[in-house]
Amino acid sequence: MIIDEIAVTAMFVHETINRMLEMQSADHPIHAWRKKLSGVETRYQSIGMAVQIDAVWNSLAESEIDAILFEEVFVPKMLEQMDFSVADLENSPKFKYGGKGAQEYTRQHLLTARNG
């Protein structure tokens, strides 16, 4: 069973992926990833990415969470950190530099940009 928090994040992931497909150049790895999957498989993989994204989000302190817009900034930036080339029918994309790397990216780039 998927908990509500992950389901909401998965919805944001799926919506952001659709925007990325429209905005990214044709050679961006997200296009090759999407061509390999059906619509249903894309939704399932959105759940896998949501679990990873929520893990990074939940690793942040409450004061850090308050400084970042989740849907508008955090989810798109986390998707940019995903390696779509390693995904297949069984495995959703993973963070290029692992979960710890995504946490570090968040602290170095998203929090410092916001707190400027």
Image (cartoon, helix red, strand yellow):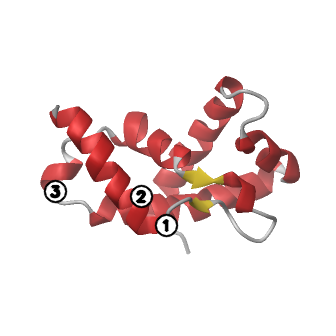
Find residue 115 and report its horizontal and vertical position in percent. 15, 35
- Most distant residue in the left direction: 63
Left or right, 58 with respect to 37, comes to left
Q: Helix or strand or loop: what does disc 1 sit on?
A: helix
Q: Name the residue under label 2.
A: 102
Find residue 114 and report its horizontal and vertical position in percent. 22, 34
Q: How crowded is mark 3: few (under 14 residues within 10 Å), some or many (20 or more)?
A: few
Camera-near label (1 vs 3) is 1
Find residue 110 and report its horizontal and vertical position in percent. 30, 41
Q: How far apart are marks 2 and 1 (CA)?
A: 6 Å
Q: Distance between the residues labelled 1 and 3?
A: 22 Å
Which amino acid type corresponds to the residue marked 1 in the rendered image? Answer: Gly
The correct choice, above or below, for 19 with respect to 15 in the image is above
Residue found 47% across the figure and 49% down from its top: 78
Which amino acid type corresponds to the residue marked 2 in the rendered image? Answer: Ala
For the N terminus, the image quarter is bottom right
Q: Residues within 10 Å of mark 2 (few under 14, many from 20)?
A: many
Q: Name the residue under label 3.
A: 62
Find residue 113 and report its horizontal and vertical position in percent. 25, 34
CB within 8 Å, label 1 to label 3: no
